[in-house]
């Protein structure tokens, strides 16, 4: 798993505080390129616990690449989903499609608006498929 600069896309050391290429601070701005198959396997092996962590990471990284400072961070998104017994998760899935579509336009990368697809997958209990597609788009943005 590598860390990439959100601003210029160059690969960075995992412990870097700023991008060595453009000087942008990393903070939460570094996108971690994740192996999708491994993330699914870890989610299954841990009975869904890893998928909660994955949701937090997906939220934080998508907020970072879309320059969205107003949306809930990953921890709040998880908390809202738990408090509402999963209802916030439907909204989250829809919003992620919109957010990644906008991030693609910002960074000049062709990303489809999958918001309705994510919502339908969530309604049918297949949010992990949404996570895979979202991670795929974030991996593309990391490059």
Image (cartoon, rainbow, N blue to C red):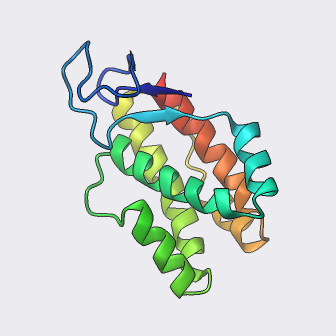
Residue 134, percent from left and from top: 59, 46
The structure residue drawn at horizontal position 79% and vertical position 71%, both measured from the top left corner, is 124
- Left or right? Give the position of 11 relative to 92: left
Residue 45 x/y as whole percent? 81, 54
Viewer-closest of 129 and 24: 24
Q: Image point 43% across, 52% down: which residue? A: 99
Q: Position of residue 33 (x, y in %)?
A: 54, 31
Left or right of 54, for residue 6: left
The quarter of the picture where residue 73 lies is bottom left
Is 16 displayed left or right of 84 in the figure? left
Q: Is residue 53 above or below residue 13?
A: below
In this view, the residue farthest toward the bottom is 84
Q: Is 68 placed above or below 143 here?
A: below
Q: Is residue 122 left or right of residue 96?
A: right
Q: Nearer the viewer, residue 60 or 109?
A: 60
- Does residue 27 appear anywhere in the picture? yes
State the residue in front, 86 or 97: 86
**Residue 9 x/y as whole percent:** 38, 21
Q: On the image, which quarter does residue 43 sit in? A: bottom right
State the residue at coordinates (48%, 21%): 143
């Amino acid at each position: 798993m590598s860390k990439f600069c959100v601003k210029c896309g160059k690969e960075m050391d995992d412990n870097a505080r700023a991008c060595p290429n453009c000087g942008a601070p990393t903070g939460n701005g570094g996108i971690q390129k994740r192996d999708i198959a491994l993330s699914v396997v870890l989610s299954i092996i841990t009975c869904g616990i890893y998928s909660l962590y994955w949701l937090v990471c997906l939220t934080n990284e998508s907020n970072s690449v879309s320059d969205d400072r107003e949306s809930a961070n990953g921890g709040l998104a998880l908390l809202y989903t738990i408090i509402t017994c999963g209802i916030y998760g439907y909204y989250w899935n829809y919003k992620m499609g919109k957010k990644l579509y906008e991030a693609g336009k910002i960074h000049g990368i062709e990303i489809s608006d999958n918001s309705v697809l994510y919502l339908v997958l969530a309604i049918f209990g297949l949010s992990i498929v949404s996570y895979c597609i979202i991670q795929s788009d974030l991996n593309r943005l990391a490059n």
